[in-house]
Amino acid sequence: MGALAAFSRTGVIKGLALSTAAQAQTRKKGGAYRRIATEEAFAIPEMMEILGGYCNSNWDNPDLDLMRRFTDPEAKTYKELIDLGDERIRNMDENGLDMQVLSLTAPGVQMFDADTANAIATLSNDRLGEAIKRHPTRFAGLAAFGPLDPKGAVKEMERAINKLKLNGFIINSHTHNEYLDDPKFWPILEAAEALDRPIYLHPRSPSELMSKLYADYGMSHALWGFQAEAGLHAMRLMLSGVFDRFPNLKIVLGHMGESIPYNIWRSDYMYEGSGAPAKMKPSEVFKRNFVITTSGVNHAPVLKYCIEVLGADNIMFAIDYPYQSSKPAVDFMNEVGISREDKEKIYHRNAERLFHMSA
């Protein structure tokens, strides 16, 4: 072994040792919890370049209004999104995070035509798989796919799990104003159920069918439109009978369930006599087939309410990095007044089970 190779190998080993020591120190300070953050965004330059071109076009779309802030390569968030190495891991170490479950940032590939979507999804999944190989104890990942081509999507889903060893799937609500309760998308749901991996149903700006009334007062994005869009999508799935056909399918919703837990009693009450095809009440479907995350909601009363209504087995910790800061989310979960057992479930046990991750 040459001197340069030996030096490089020594540096890598030293870096790993420092990283492990940092994890151990922050874990000790936080109460010895393993911390897995389950909605953490990344991007690849090729996707951002296409979205940047859309942002400079005349396409009047609320997703692009948001993306204009992030597609500039000099923007701080852009640099954080495309980083799958040192700076991201440094941020994790500083905040006591053991792992991030990475997913392609919204709106992902769903604004593209079918061929472009398939190509970018494949490329991003390859890059994600490579990052996980480089940092197998720090990263896990959710695979993107192009819903416009359900057969191609299924093929990529199978490759992502069986070859790349990813942990689930990401979809950003509607695709060209269409939703997953449409039977043409059911091969995607069938594949996720067969592969025993969840689909993370992530928000995006409201579809053209509902967007006009959200355009005022900044409501198109996280202020209100995101939860309205993702919550609508989830309710369509629950009421359509999709989960009667795919009883073992798992869907993950961020942001403390996109407001659905707070409306679940009323949804059950109004379900009777509604004519909805689903055989089970919304609360029954939600508790059986959905898991929620804490992403973007560092609010103790909300978390305690969701534990009471859904049970701690159905909640996972998430940050929404880099769109939200790691420290407030970790501090919140460290300090929130819930049992240690529930905190362990939310911090890591549920993610390990749902995403087939080693404990």
Image: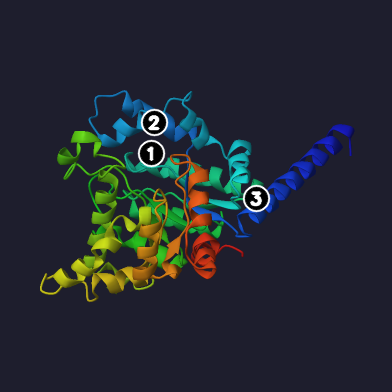
Figure quadrant of the N terminus: top right
Q: Residue at x 25, y 44 (%)?
A: 225
* Mark drawn on residue 26: 3
Question: Where is the C terminus found, in terms of image quarters?
Answer: bottom right
Spatial separation of the CA atoms under disc 1 and disc 3: 42 Å
- Of callouts 2 and 3, the N-terminal one: 3
Q: Would residue 276 be seen by someone viewing this image from the given angle?
A: no
Q: Amino acid at mark 1?
A: Thr
Q: CA distance from mark 2 to mark 1?
A: 10 Å
Across and down, in percent, residue 179 comes to 25, 54
Q: Secondary structure at mark 1?
A: helix
Q: Are dots 2 and 3 in contact, CB under 8 Å?
A: no
User: Which residue matches tag 2?
Assistant: 50
Question: Mark number for residue 116?
Answer: 1
Choose between 345 and 31: the one closer to the eye.
31
Amino acid type of disc 2?
Ile
